[in-house]
Amino acid sequence: MPGNHQERGSEPTRDEVVPMLGEARMVVPGIQSLFGFQLIAVFTEGFRSLDAVQRLLHFTSLLATLIAIGLIMSPAAHHRLAEEWAATARFMRISSRLIALAMIALMIALTIEIVVISDFLFGSVLVDSAFAVAIVVFFGGLWFCWPLATRRPDRKYD
């Protein structure tokens, strides 16, 4: 946080924990909305027209979304139960990793869904693969490569 010059490895302040939990809370509605649409899709007439591979891919995406939900909501449960509401460096490390893993699961879910839609629309492995690569590069670049390339050298809680 600006103006906070704690040394690396020191305990975080409440002002550092609250934004981290807020980041997780910002992602939850989007993941839950995706999950809702994925569930509804299974009961539509169009879903029945998908072939077995496309339905299996959709189910795999649904599972990846469930994993993302579990991971993104875990920091709050961990903070409440394991840390007894304390702001610790351990909590910050665990939570940051859980949120990053949730974003990976979400990226997988979104990529698979785009592949299913692409396959349904175009029926081309080449087009499906191009969309899959584009989605992974886009989200991987925005969510991981760019932040890692620009992170502050004085970062804490590694």
Image (cartoon, helix red, strand yellow):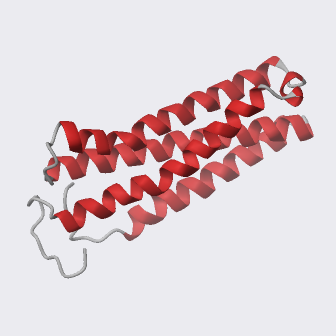
Direction top: furthest residue: 52
Which residue is found at the position 90% from the left and 40% from the top? Answer: 121
Asked whether, in this view, residue 108 is left or right of residue 4, the answer is: right
- Left or right: 94 as drawn, with respect to 138: left
Q: Is residue 130 above or below residue 147?
A: above
Q: Quadrant of residue 49?
A: top right
Quadrant in the rendering for residue 23 = bottom left
- Res. 117 image quadrant: top right
Residue shown at 76% from the left, 26% from the top: 42
What x and y, as percent, mark residue 106? 55, 43
Q: Please give the name of the residue rendered at 11% of the width and 71% of the height, measured from the top-left corner.
A: 6
Is the N terminus in the top left, top right, bottom left or bottom right quadrant? bottom left
73 vs 67, nearest the viewer: 73
Q: In which quarter of the image is the C terminus?
A: bottom left
| Residue drawn at x 22%, y 42% as measured from the top left | 80
**Above or below, 75 relative to 62:** below
In the rendered image, residue 67, in percent from the top left (x then y), is placed at: 48, 32
Residue 13 image offset from top left, x and y in percent: 15, 64
Residue 8 image offset from top left, x and y in percent: 12, 63
Q: Number of callouts in the render?
A: 0
Residue 143, above or below 59: below
Q: Residue furthest bottom?
A: 3
Image-based side of 15 in relation to 139, left or right: left
